[in-house]
Image (cartoon, helix red, strand yellow):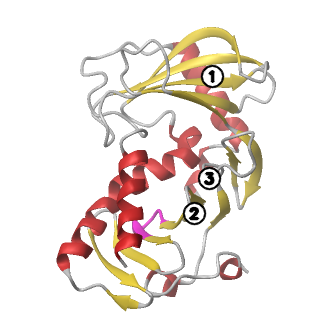
């Protein structure tokens, strides 16, 4: 049991601090960049439009060996790690329950920290999948940085993304590569602070496929065995509500049939 809880906290520390949006990057009013906004609108159109996002209620994915099912309407989250840990929580109320091999963890010194981690964990892990649909959200500031190329050598329009009063980690910045032809985001670079000149990392956004009504990218590395590649992706308007009460891990493919 101890090893499972330790794995959870290691993952939360490594990835919860390194990504997602900023709460302090831009605290003053920033003029809208018309060209950046126009490119962002082209990205959303290439993804299928805002209606595709609004028509999708349930989204599931595995990232960094963690499986999630998110109900966008109720903000319920099912989280699984390994073959035994299940956390059922609500992202709005920050309440939930923890189960290990089907038995509820009633020791609050163990369960409460896991439940508290659900919101920042979801915020990070969902951004690795859903960021392109969020680039025009309130609090996002986009700037057009000119022409560029991806690490693979493809020409792209470069957008700088910073944040104002949103998110769970401060001062982040991203540089997004928007493909000249497809108008999809095909690469991102992450900066821990918006004042940094060099990124902490650059990762591809490849292998776009249709899941329900959403067009989503699963490729975050050229290495097919990289744990940051995203798997078990599903998106749907309906789903069995019992999944948000089931205490043991689920069959990640069968539940969608």
**Label 3, residues with CA under 10 Å away: few <14, some 14-19, many ≥20:** some
Q: Which residue is mark 3?
A: 227
Foreground mark, 3 or 1? 3
Q: Which residue is mark 1?
A: 39
Q: Earlier in the sequence, mark 2 or mark 1?
A: 1
For label 2, the crowd category at 10 Å Cα-Cα, with few meaning under 14, some 14 to 19 and many 20 or more, is many
Q: Nearer the viewer, residue 40 or 202?
A: 202
| Residue drawn at point x = 25 percent, y = 17 percent | 28
The residue identified by callout 2 is 59
Above or below: residue 200 compared with residue 20:
above
The residue drawn where x is 50% and y is 40% is 134
Residue lying farthest to the front in this orientation: 3
Q: Percent x, y for residue 31?
A: 38, 12
Q: Where residue 164 appears, x then y in whole percent?
A: 31, 28
Tally of marks: 3
The stretch of residues the image draws in magenta is: 71-77
Q: CB atoms at circles 2 and 3 under 8 Å apart?
A: no
Residue 240 is situated, as x and y percent measured from the top left of the image, at 57, 84
Q: Secondary structure at mark 1?
A: helix
């Amino acid at each position: 049991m101890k090893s499972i809880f330790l794995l959870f906290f290691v993952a939360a520390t490594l990835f919860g601090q390194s990504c997602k949006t900023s709460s302090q990057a831009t605290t003053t009013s920033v003029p809208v960049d018309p060209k950046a906004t126009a490119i962002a609108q082209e990205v959303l159109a290439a993804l299928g439009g805002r209606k595709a996002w609004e028509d999708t209620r349930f989204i599931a994915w595995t990232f960094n060996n963690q499986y999630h099912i998110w109900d966008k309407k109720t903000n319920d989250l099912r989280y699984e790690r390994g073959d035994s840990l299940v956390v059922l929580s609500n992202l709005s109320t920050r309440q939930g329950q923890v189960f290990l091999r089907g038995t509820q963890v009633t020791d609050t010194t163990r369960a409460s920290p896991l439940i508290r981690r659900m919101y920042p964990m979801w915020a990070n892990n969902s951004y690795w999948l859903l960021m392109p649909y969020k680039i025009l959200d309130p609090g996002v500031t986009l700037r057009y940085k000119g022409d560029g190329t991806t690490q693979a050598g493809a020409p792209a329009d470069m957008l700088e993304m910073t944040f104002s009063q949103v998110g769970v980690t401060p001062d982040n910045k991203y540089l997004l590569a928007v493909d000249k032809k497809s108008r999809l985001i095909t690469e991102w670079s992450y900066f821990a602070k918006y004042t940094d000149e060099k990124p902490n990392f650059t990762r591809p956004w490849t292998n776009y496929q249709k899941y329900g009504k959403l067009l989503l990218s699963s490729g975050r590395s050229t290495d097919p065995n990289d744990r940051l590649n995203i798997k078990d992706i599903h998106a749907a308007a309906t789903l069995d509500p019992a999944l948000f009460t089931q205490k043991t891990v689920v069959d990640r493919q069968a539940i969608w049939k």
